[in-house]
């Protein structure tokens, strides 16, 4: 029997080594960003472990099940070392990263004290911001310029100055800024010419997160979007990423409730259990919660969270099982809890003979504790993508997002397990290893496979 082949030699990449320093640019030095920075410094000092991070802790299988290897992901592909990361960022408030981390109250004070110096040295650069896009915040530390194009140029200058002063080899940008009001795609978002004309004419449809994305792409810096804002997810900037050969990923970090939704929903569907209702509510007391109290920002978040279930359950293909699903999402700002979010999910399901059942999930999570390793992995994987010569949408990073960006003619994948397989298989392809499909029938059906101990997936 000829051996089943799942190699893609034509897609294998010659990946440049991860030598030198990697700048991590963070628009929005708030709870997530400072938890990330504090965490990396604590880990580098040997005072904490990188729990939650695939790039730091996960192993992946290479080779046949009869002769498997389980190296760490960071041994399979060359990733930047945490000691080579240099952080910088922008915020609409002038507090340094230590002060903000203390206010955010995510990392315990005694841990923060151990990395006070490096955190204090990170002072945000003045931000590109307008209150019209985040109504709950009044910024005090802002850039001023006659047009959005001038503001974009100032961001590019910040990036170049950061590169020079820190002696950076490469840089990536991860948007950790607030959720902006809901914006519909408009003609100014259609082409890069229209977008650049809109920057000069101060088009109201161009939000600050789009200006940061434009600046990053202009500077050749990969961009990931941790919020549900459109940011790079408009045709004009997609075209621009292809022109400048910059990898991008987004949108909206998949961390708490939606992470669990994309674990549970595929399981119910795999067993053909029906759903009549899924009510998700959260209480959240950090600044993100306050921003989301505004209906404009909440709408952006709601759209991002809502797409998940219908994409996984495919009610068009399974109308009897999922055609009547009532999906409701609430986020309540409740200051006493700070960053410690509590999410409740009530799931009404039905099984054999239409008999109803219920599932309750009560997730007492820590928002930024879940988001920081996601931001770290995105920084390292986007840098890898750039060194591997990949550009445009990095769909294999869908794993990290609530509303994954996909090519317009492709439906995004939301099932966490498919996303994970997509991620690890992409890494296998990049280094010329065999892709795994886990079918395994060839281990049993082929006499040759029995005799030689070989098999397929
Ligand atoms: N924490 C999570 O689990 C999670 C999950 C998914 C998405 N997110 C998203 O990540 C983002 C950050 O979350 P967070 O909890 O750190 O919020 P946060 O409010 O603590 O931090 C956001 C920071 O962005 C700043 N900011 C707002 N607009 C800006 C601009 N134009 N330029 C520069 N800075 C700006 C704010 O001043 C604030 O300091 C939010 O959009 C949030 O919705 C967070």
Image (cartoon, helix red, strand yellow):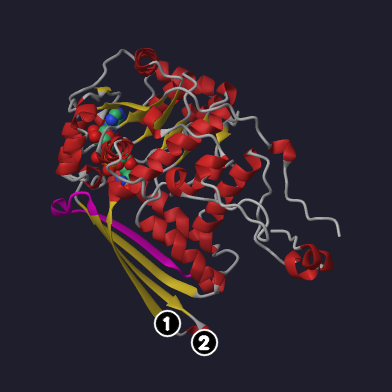
Provide residue 388's location: percent of width, then percent of height. 59, 30
Which quadrant: the C terminus? bottom right
Question: What's the residue at 52%, 64% (across, down)?
Answer: 313
- Tell me the SS state at disc 1: strand
Q: Which residue is mark 2?
A: 353
Q: Quadrant of residue 66?
A: bottom right
Residue for point 55% across, 69% down: 270
Which numbered dot is residue 356? 1
- The secondary element bearing badge 2 is classed as helix
In the depicted view, which residue is nearer to us: 319 or 220?
220
Please state the extent of the stretch shown in magenta in the rendering.
323-340
Image location (x, y in percent) of residue 232: 46, 32
**Magenta region includes residue 337:** yes
113, above or below 335, in the image: above
Q: Position of residue 37 (x, y in %)?
A: 30, 35
Mark 2 CB within 8 Å of ligand 1: no
Q: Is residue 270 magenta?
A: no
């Amino acid at each position: 029997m000829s051996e089943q082949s799942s190699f893609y030699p034509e897609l294998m990449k010659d990946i440049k080594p991860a030598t030198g320093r990697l700048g991590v640019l963070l628009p929005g030095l708030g709870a997530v960003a400072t938890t990330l920075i504090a965490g990396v410094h604590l880990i580098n000092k040997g005072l904490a472990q990188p729990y939650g991070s695939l790039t730091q802790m996960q192993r992946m299988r290479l080779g046949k099940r009869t002769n498997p290897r389980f190296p760490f992901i960071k041994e399979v592909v060359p990733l930047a070392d945490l000691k080579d990361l240099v952080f910088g960022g922008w915020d609409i408030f002038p507090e340094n990263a230590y002060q903000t981390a203390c206010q955010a109250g995510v990392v315990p004070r005694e841990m923060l004290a151990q990395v006070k110096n490096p955190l204090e040295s990170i002072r945000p650069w003045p931000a590109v911001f307008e209150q019209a896009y985040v109504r709950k915040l009044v910024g005090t530390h802002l850039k001023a310029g006659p047009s959005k194009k001038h503001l974009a140029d100032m961001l590019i200058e910040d990036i170049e100055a950061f590169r020079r002063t820190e002696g950076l080899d490469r840089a990536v940008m991860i948007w950790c800024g607030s959720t902006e009001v809901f914006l519909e795609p408009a003609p100014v978002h259609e082409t890069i010419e229209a977008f650049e004309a809109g920057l000069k004419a101060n088009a109201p449809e161009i939000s600050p997160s789009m200006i940061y994305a434009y600046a990053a792409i202009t500077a050749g810096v990969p961009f990931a979007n941790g919020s549900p804002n459109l940011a790079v997810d408009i045709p004009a900037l997609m075209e621009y990423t292809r022109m400048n050969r910059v990898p991008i990923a987004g949108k909206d970090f998949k961390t708490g409730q939606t992470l669990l939704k994309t674990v549970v929903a595929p399981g119910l569907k795999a067993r053909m259990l029906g759903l009549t209702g899924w009510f998700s509510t959260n209480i959240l007391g950090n600044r993100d919660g306050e921003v989301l109290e505004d209906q404009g920002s909440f709408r952006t978040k709601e759209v991002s969270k809502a797409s998940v279930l219908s994409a996984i359950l495919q009610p068009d293909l399974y109308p009897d099982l999922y055609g009547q699903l009532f999906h409701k999402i609430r986020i309540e700002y409740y200051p006493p809890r700070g960053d410690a979010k509590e999410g409740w999910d009530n799931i009404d399901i039905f099984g054999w003979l239409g008999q109803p059942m219920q599932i309750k999930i009560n997730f007492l999570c820590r928002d930024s504790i879940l988001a920081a390793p996601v931001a770290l992995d995105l920084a390292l994987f986007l840098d890898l993508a750039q060194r591997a010569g990949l550009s445009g949408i990095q769909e294999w990073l869908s794993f990290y997002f609530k509303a994954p960006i996909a090519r317009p003619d492709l439906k995004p994948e939301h099932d966490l397990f498919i996303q994970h397989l997509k991620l690890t298989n992409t890494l296998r392809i990049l280094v010329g290893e065999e892709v795994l499909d886990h079918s395994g029938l060839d281990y049993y059906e082929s006499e040759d496979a029995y005799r030689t101990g070989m098999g397929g997936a």
